[in-house]
Image: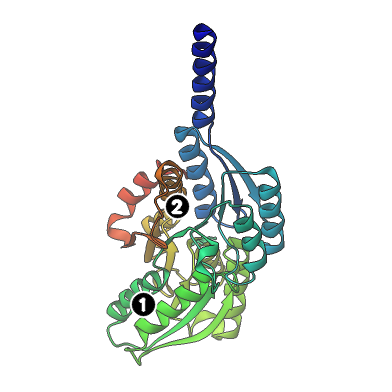
Amino acid sequence: MWKRLLLVSAVSAAMSSAVMAAPLVVGFSQVGSESGWRAAETNVAKTEAKERGITLKIADAQQKQENQIKAVRSFIAQGVDAIFIAPVVATGWEPVLEEAKDAKIPVFLLDRSIDVKDKSLYMTTVTANNVLEGQLIGDWLVKTVAGKPCNVVELQGTVGASVAIDRKKGFAEAIAKAPNIKIIRSQSGDFTRSKGKEVMESFIKAENNGKNICMVYSHNDDMVIGAIQAIKEAGLKPGKDILTGSIDGVPDIYKAMMAGDANASVELTPDMAGPAFDALEKYKKDGTIPPKTIITKSTLYLPDTAKQQYERKLHMGY
Ligand code: AHR
């Protein structure tokens, strides 16, 4: 009898340790593949998951919130352990996040924030200080033009995305102290190279074949790389006739700096998933609730270190 009891308890101990060791399954609703930075973020998330033995299911939303909502519902139906969302836009999340909450599935936000009253609908947001990113470019411009008149055209990110709102705000705040600097045109290029080029072409046409433009401020590097092409096609020299300032720090922006075509970029780390996995693992282990926001570093890089940055970047998931 006691032998049977021993056997039963050994089997149940083995079963419970198997249950404990079951790998976490995370559903990740990714924005899309609109930029080089986004592709790197996806790659880093895959690598981080693999190293931790986490099963990561990625759904590409193709820049549409409706696709993200469908993906989140599907992750809930599959009973994943956690849901990561890089939210395309900031508003409209309450209903689906309430469904996740009812299903007791924690939600982690990556790189963009959301606008909800009830903060218990998500665990944490891993993001940069995007207002600061805009400020860093604005401060650099104020210093660079040193009181000379400067007309700026702005390439905004996706309309309604928290990062576009914050980067616009930060830049505007920084140049507010310099009456010589004015934003003369501002339009969305949806964070893509092709739209960045298209919008820049229209700015150039409208502004005396680009001669009225002193600087292009772009909410990401990909749009400015498209804009650089448009500037060249208009017979102007990017980086000189029209200065550039942007955000992300993708390898191509450092290449452009090395060629003298770009002037400044603020690095946004593509490693948003790493801190989110750390927070998730701690939470699953002992119930630790992470801070509501986990802020990543923002650093301004200029052409003087472009070569080193380019080489460093090649090992970062790009
Ligand atoms: O949310 C982060 C932004 O989204 C990146 O700066 C941009 O490249 C991407 O599309």
Q: Residue at x 71, y 49 (%)?
A: 74
Give the position of the N terminus as an image quadrant.
top right
Which one is earlier in the sequence, the residue at label 1 or at label 2? 1
Residue 45 seen: yes
Q: Residue at x 54, y 15 (%)?
A: 8
Give the farthest residue toward the bottom.
179
Element assignment for label 2: loop
Location of residue 12 with respect to 80 vertically, above or below = above
Location of residue 289 with respect to 176 vertically, above or below = above
- Amino acid, disc 2: Met
Residue 78 percent across, percent down from the top left: 68, 43
Nearest the camera: 264 or 17? 17
Give the colouring mode of the picture. rainbow
Element assignment for label 1: helix
Residue 228 seen: no
Q: Is residue 174 left or right of residue 98?
A: left
Nearest the camera: 178 or 14? 14
Residue 72 percent across, percent down from the top left: 66, 54
Count of numbered circles on the image: 2
Residue under label 2: 272
Q: Is residue 63 left or right of residue 116?
A: right
Residue under label 1: 138
Nearest the camera: 116 or 10? 10
- Amino acid, disc 1: Gly
Residue 84 percent across, percent down from the top left: 55, 52
Q: Residues within 10 Å of mark 1 (few under 14, many from 20)?
A: many
